[in-house]
Amino acid sequence: MRSVFSTDRWGIYISIVLALAVACDRQPSRLEQALVFAGNNRAELEKVLAHYFANAADSLKYRAVCFLIENMLCHYSYSGKALDDFGLNYKNETIKT
């Protein structure tokens, strides 16, 4: 009769334990990541969060603000002289044709 803890099952048990340990790794929340990524604008975003968090009647608005801030990570834009010059050149070329 084979034991429940036979050597061939130890690999499976260890794999499950390791998978659970990796899955429980503490990552910063998406909100915290967005606030870190905001840089100088972090204080302004925290003011908005505090405003809606203070009033229990605005709980839906608070969750909406959290959603918007969390999803700011993948939305950004470029700016600067090179982009402005590109826009002017593109506009001038499209008008010619």
Image (spheres, helix red, strand yellow):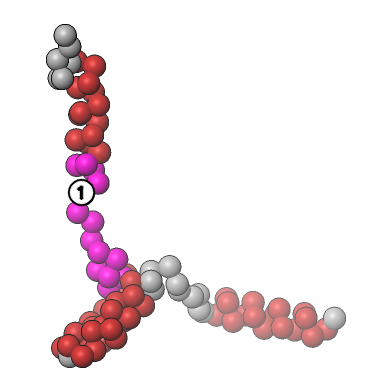
Question: Relative to 26, is 37 on the left or the right?
Answer: right
What SS does tag 1 mark?
A: loop
Residue where numbered disc 1 is placed:
24
Q: Position of residue 35 (x, y in %)?
A: 27, 73
Look at the picture and state if 89 lies above or below 58. Answer: above
The three-letter amino acid code for the residue at tag 1 is Cys
Is residue 33 within the magenta segment? yes
Q: Quadrant of residue 29?
A: bottom left
Residue sitting nearer the eye, 63 or 1: 1
Give residue 67's quadrant in the image: bottom left
Q: Residues within 10 Å of mark 1 (few under 14, many from 20)?
A: few
Q: Name the quadrant of the C terminus.
A: bottom right
Stretch of the chain drawn in magenta: 20-35
Q: Position of residue 12 (x, y in %)?
A: 25, 26
Judge by depth and name the residue closer to the eye, 19 or 84.
19
Q: Is residue 64 magenta?
A: no
Q: Which residue sits at x=23%, y=84%?
A: 59
The residue located at (24%, 68%) in the rendering is: 32
Name the side, left or right, on which 70 lies relative to 88.
left
- The percent position of residue 76, horizontal first and vertical second, equals 45, 73
Name the outermost residue toward the right: 97
Left or right: 34, with 56 as reference point = right
Which residue is drawn at the image coordinates 29% and 66% (left, top)?
30
Which residue is found at the position 27% from the left and 70% from the top? 31
Q: In which quadrant is the N terminus drawn? A: top left
The image quadrant of residue 64 is: bottom left
Task: Answer left or right for 44 relative to 73.
Answer: left
Would residue 21 be visible to someone looking at this image?
yes
> x and y percent of residue 28 in the render?
23, 61
SS majority, magenta: helix
Using the image, determine if residue 6 lies above or below residue 80. above
